[in-house]
Image (cartoon, rainbow, N blue to C red):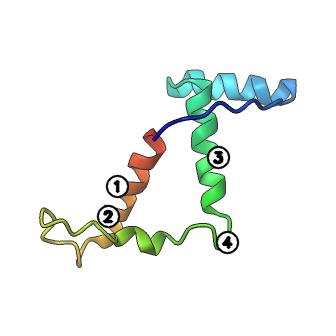
Amino acid sequence: MKKVPLQVYVDQALHQQLCLIAKRQKVTQAELVRKYLYQGMQREPGLHDTALDIIGLGDGKTTDLSARHDHYLALREKERWKD
């Protein structure tokens, strides 16, 4: 996914917290901000229906999709956080 620049101003306390958490998690501040934005936007009603994420999971490699669909949806969500 192509990233576009976004400039955001935060107060000093939030910046300090962001720096601390990023350091603890060994990620960049930008990665952490993206993660929190994605998490917050997932809670927005009507924006994205996670049940639709199951589409395309059955590519022939997953033989237990019907029994373990929650597991595969969770894995896909974790992959999104990496982007």
Say which label, 3 or 1, has the lower sequence index.
3
Q: Are marks 1 and 4 in contact (CB under 8 Å)?
A: no
Task: Inspect the image, locate mark 1, and give the three-letter code of the amino acid beneath it.
Answer: Leu
The amino acid beneath tag 4 is: Pro
Labels 4 and 2 touching (C-beta < 8 A) = no
34 above or below 19? below
The residue positioned 55% from the left and 32% from the top of the image is 31
Residue at 64% in and 46% down: 37
Cα gap from disc 1 to disc 4, whole angstroms: 22 Å
Quadrant of residue 10 in the image? top right
For disc 1, the marked residue is 75
The amino acid at mark 2 is His
Which mark's residue is nearer the viewer, 3 or 1? 3
User: Could you say which disc has been placed on residue 45 in the image?
Assistant: 4
Q: CA distance from mark 2 to mark 1?
A: 6 Å
Q: Say which amino acid is labelled 3.
A: Leu
Left or right: 81 with respect to 42?
Answer: left
- Label drawn at residue 37: 3
Quickly name the residue at label 2.
71
Q: Quadrant of the N terminus?
A: top left
Determine the secondary structure under disc 1.
Answer: helix
Q: Is residue 81 left or right of residue 67?
A: right
- Identify which residue, 2 or 75, lies in the foreground: 2
Circles 2 and 1 in contact, beta carbons < 8 Å: yes
Circle 1 crowding by C-alpha within 10 Å: few under 14, some 14–19, many from 20: few
At numbered mark 4, what does the secondary structure look like: helix, strand or loop? Answer: loop
Q: Residue at x 60, y 60 (%)?
A: 42
Query: Which comes sooner in the sequence, label 4 or label 3?
Result: 3
Q: Which comes before the other along the chain, label 2 or label 3?
A: 3
Q: Report how far apart the C-alphas of labels 4 and 3 lie in the structure.
A: 15 Å
Q: Is 45 left, or right, of 3 in this rendering?
A: right
Mark found first going from the N terminus, 4 or 2:
4
